Each structure stands twice: as C-alpha cells, then as structure tokens.
Amino acid sequence: MLRYLWIPCLLCGFLLACGGGENPNFANNGASADASSAGPNGKKIFKTHCVACHGVKGDMGVNGAANLNVSELPIRERIQTITHGRMEKGMTPYKGILSPEEIKAVAEYTLTLKG
Ligand code: HEC
C-alpha cells in the first residue's frame, strides 16, 4: 500500500514545479479575456447563434434576415426581437436558448455592427 504513495507525491511535486512558472501567465490570460467583456461575450454568442442567417458582419441576410448594419432598432427592441424572435419572418426566438444576460450582450454587440 505504502509503495504507491510516491505516485501522487511525485505528481504533486511535478505540478507545483511546472505551475510555478506558468500560473501567472494563465491567470493573466483569463483576466484579460474577462475584463474585455465583463459578462457574457456578445461577439462570441453572435458567432455561435446568429451568423447562420445574419452573417459575420450582420449583413448577409439569409432567408430575409434583417441587415443589422442598417437597422435603426433601439437596444430595447433588439432585446425583444432576439428574446421572442419573429417567427412569421423566420427569426428564431432565443428565450430559453440564451440567458437574458446573453441576449443583452448579443443585442449590444449587434449595435456595434452598424456602419
Ligand atoms: C434562422 C435565421 C435567423 C437567426 C439564426 C437569427 N436571426 Fe435575427 N432575424 C432573422 C430575420 C429573418 C429577421 C427579420 C425579421 C423581420 O423582417 O422583421 C431578423 C431580425 C433581427 C433583428 C431586428 C432587426 C431590425 O432592424 O428589425 C435583430 C436585432 C436580430 N435579428 C438579431 C439577431 C441575433 C442577435 C441573433 C442571434 C442570437 C439572430 N438575430 C439570429 C433571422 C435570423
């Protein structure tokens, strides 16, 4: 039984030895990724859920998807549209797929597509 104790010990030592050098870097990467968005990452959500119809730049218009570059819709109505969709026009409702925070983040991201 005692014979096997050295294995976790060795692993521990190994991790500590390696981690010492790399951990600060790790922590930094994590922090900067979070700091830039402070919450859900709207861009990432858009790329995952919305590009199929709206395109990476928001102007692809597959299946009649609105051109988000020219949309004048205010943020509140964007949130409404994303939450409840426009079933009759072909826009998926995201209620239950995305959290309200994620919907807000992606709605804010769509505002940046303008221009
Ligand atoms: C299945 C295709 C499809 C997907 C996926 C989709 N949309 Fe849409 N979206 C549409 C269509 C079609 C319209 C146009 C509705 C209309 O003409 O009223 C629209 C309209 C919108 C509008 C309203 C713009 C305006 O000016 O009226 C916003 C904002 C929007 N989408 C954001 C999103 C976001 C954000 C996502 C991802 C979370 C998304 N959409 C995913 C098809 C899609």
Image (cartoon, rainbow, N blue to C red):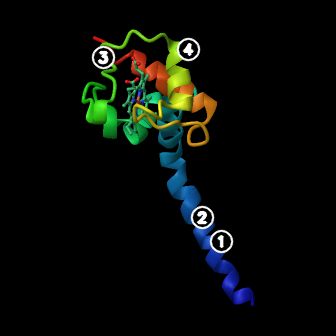
Q: Earlier in the sequence, mark 1 or mark 4?
A: 1
Dot 4 alpha-carbon crowd within 10 angstroms: few under 14, some 14 to 19, many 20 or more: few
Residue marked by disc 2: 13
Q: What secondary structure is found at the residue carrying circle 1?
A: helix
Dot 3 alpha-carbon crowd within 10 angstroms: few under 14, some 14 to 19, many 20 or more: some
Are the two marked residues, 1 and 3, in contact with CB atoms closer than 8 angstroms? no
Give the amino acid at mark 3.
Asn
Residue marked by disc 3: 69
Q: What secondary structure is found at the residue carrying circle 2?
A: helix
Q: CA distance from mark 4 to mark 3?
A: 17 Å
Residues 50 and 93: in front is 93
**Residue found 41% across the figure and 41% down from its top:** 48
Q: CA distance from mark 1 to mark 2?
A: 6 Å
Residue marked by disc 4: 76
Q: Respond yes or no on whether mark 1 lies under 8 Å from ligand 1.
A: no
Dot 1 alpha-carbon crowd within 10 angstroms: few under 14, some 14 to 19, many 20 or more: few
**Residue 52 vertical placement versus 2 (above, below):** above
Q: Earlier in the sequence, mark 1 or mark 3?
A: 1
Residues 70 and 28: in front is 70
Residues 52 and 18: in front is 52
- In percent of width and height, residue 23 lies at 53, 45
Q: Respond yes or no on whether mark 4 lies under 8 Å from ligand 1.
A: no
**Residue 50 vertical placement versus 38 (above, below):** below
Q: Earlier in the sequence, mark 2 or mark 3?
A: 2
Residue marked by disc 1: 9
Q: What secondary structure is found at the residue carrying circle 4?
A: helix
Give the amino acid at mark 4.
Arg
- In percent of width and height, residue 83 lies at 56, 30
Give the amino acid at mark 2.
Gly
Q: Can the viewer see residue 79?
A: yes
